[in-house]
Image: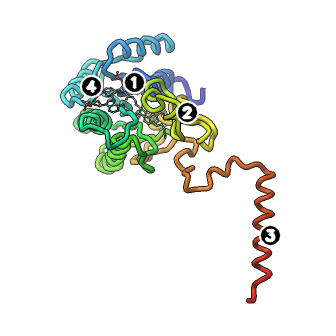
């Protein structure tokens, strides 16, 4: 284990969307390092099973759950209030819940747009607001980390509502970092590349025809998908007291995926040493020819 097993002892962290995929992996990682973790989602059974599984692994009742729809501001506020009363103040929040599907934008209905943006943007705001205003009222510091995606920098066709809403949460991250720094509240985000999870892959890679660069390991310069424990280590650091001066940042964790755009020479990563030697010969020949014609 890279970090001490108890390095997050005393931390109490809420993870939205913590019953599945990346959120569940983060819950497991933080609980394994001593944190008390609260997980939210809309499916009680999924949450109960996830909490029981992780509690058995850590041999402690460290993970608690509540069924909450983060699109409903009043429900979010009530559920955060319940944590405060029953367990005590949170020390951290991970805005991780999301909705997404691929679709041609011209065919999206207003309700389809709303289903995604209200979860990603409104949900992150409602949760951040409910937690942040309690920290400020109680004079407590805290750490907020949102799970974004590298589309905040590149945009992406066919997932426009997701790219728009994630960009909005990036704007929230930068804005609140400045507004809330004086209260000791840090606001950061992570921008993962592809980390295959069950539901996301059903939504984003449902058929062979829809298998494209965004979901293919061989399009990642690092040559592989991300592992949730790597993301866990980054989030752990941001939730610890070890880097209090980091705020307002969105940190990519994607094996350089988003930088390897088709407009760059990223594809040349596939060339062999022999091919590079040939390229050098060709270029040198062209250069020598041009040098021979120089008159000054
Ligand atoms: C570089 C990195 C590469 C990988 C990047 C990955 C980045 C991000 C990934 C994610 O965010 S993955 C998260 C995936 N997880 C989820 O989506 C979980 C939650 N999802 C859901 O609840 C549903 O799947 C939902 C459809 C998104 C929303 O469900 P909800 O119950 O709120 O809505 P519905 O009533 O079912 O539908 C509302 C509206 O939307 C239309 N719609 C639904 N699916 C589609 C579709 N596939 N295509 C087009 N339209 C769709 C549906 O028809 C409704 O509209 P109307 O018909 O009523 O107009
Ligand atoms: N997997 C990947 O490659 C990448 C993922 N991400 C981001 O990581 C995060 C996790 O994604 P991933 O684990 O792959 O996908 P999942 O579908 O497994 O996770 C989404 C979670 O959000 C919860 N959720 C959705 N809507 C709501 C709601 N209205 N209220 C409360 N909870 C809700 C879901 O639970 P329920 O349905 O029970 O409500 C589910 O647990 C997302 O923010 C995603 O955008 C970013 C980049 C890459």
Q: Which mark is residue 285?
A: 3
What secondary structure is marked by label 3?
helix
User: Which of the two discs, 2 and 4, sits closer to the camera?
Assistant: 4
Q: Secondary structure at mark 4?
A: loop
Task: Please tell me in which quadrant of the rendered image residue 190 appears.
Answer: top left
> Alpha-carbon neighbours of circle 3 within 10 Å: few (<14), some, or many (≥20)?
few
How would you rate the neighbour count of disc 4 (Cα within 10 Å): few for under 14, some for 14-19, many for 20 or more? some
The answer to which of 205 and 163 lies nearer the viewer is 205
* Residue for point 42% across, 29% down: 203
Q: Is residue 152 above or below residue 242?
A: below
Name the residue carrying label 1.
Answer: 18
Q: Residue at x 39, y 40 (%)?
A: 159
| Left or right: 116 as drawn, with respect to 27 | left
The answer to whether mark 1 is within 8 Å of ligand 2 is: yes
Element marked by disc 1: loop
Q: For ligand 1, give the image quadrant.
A: top left
For the residues labelled 2 and 4, the Cα–Cα distance comes to 28 Å
Residue at horizontal 79%, vertical 51%? Answer: 273
**Beta carbon at label 3 within 8 Å of ligand 1:** no
Q: Secondary structure at mark 2?
A: helix
Kindly check if marks 2 and 3 are in contact, taking CB atoms under 8 A apart as contact.
no
Write down the quadrant of residue 50 in the picture: top left
**Badge 2 is on which residue?**
230
Q: Earlier in the sequence, mark 3 or mark 4?
A: 4
Q: Residues within 10 Å of mark 2 (few under 14, many from 20)?
A: few
């Amino acid at each position: 284990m890279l970090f001490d097993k108890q390095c997050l002892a005393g931390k109490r962290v809420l993870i939205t969307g913590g019953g599945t995929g990346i959120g569940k992996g983060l819950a497991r990682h933080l609980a394994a390092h001593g944190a008390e973790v609260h997980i939210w989602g809309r499916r009680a059974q999924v949450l109960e099973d996830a909490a029981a599984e992780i509690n058995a692994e850590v041999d402690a009742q460290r993970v608690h759950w509540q069924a909450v729809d983060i699109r409903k501001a009043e429900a979010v506020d009530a559920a955060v209030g319940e944590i405060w009363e029953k367990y005590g103040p949170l020390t951290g929040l991970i805005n991780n819940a999301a909705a997404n599907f691929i679709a041609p934008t011209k065919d999206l209905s207003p309700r389809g747009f709303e289903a995604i943006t209200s979860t990603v943007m409104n949900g992150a705001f409602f949760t951040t607001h409910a937690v942040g205003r309690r920290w400020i009222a109680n004079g407590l510091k805290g750490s907020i980390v949102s799970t974004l995606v590298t589309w905040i920098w590149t945009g992406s066709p066919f997932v426009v509502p997701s790219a728009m809403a994630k960009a909005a949460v990036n704007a929230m991250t930068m804005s609140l970092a400045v507004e809330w720094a004086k209260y000791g509240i840090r606001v950061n985000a992570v921008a993962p590349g592809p980390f295959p999870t069950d539901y996301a892959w059903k939504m984003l890679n449902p058929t062979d025809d829809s298998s494209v660069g965004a979901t293919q390991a061989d399009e990642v310069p690092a040559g592989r998908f991300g592992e949730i424990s790597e993301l866990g280590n980054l989030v752990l650091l941001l939730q610890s007291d070890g880097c209090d001066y980091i705020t307002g940042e969105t940190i990519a964790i994607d094996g350089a995926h988003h930088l390897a755009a088709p407009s760059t020479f990223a594809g040349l990563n596939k060339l062999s040493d022999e091919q590079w030697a040939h390229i050098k010969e060709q270029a040198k020949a062209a250069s020598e020819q041009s040098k021979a014609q120089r008159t000054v």
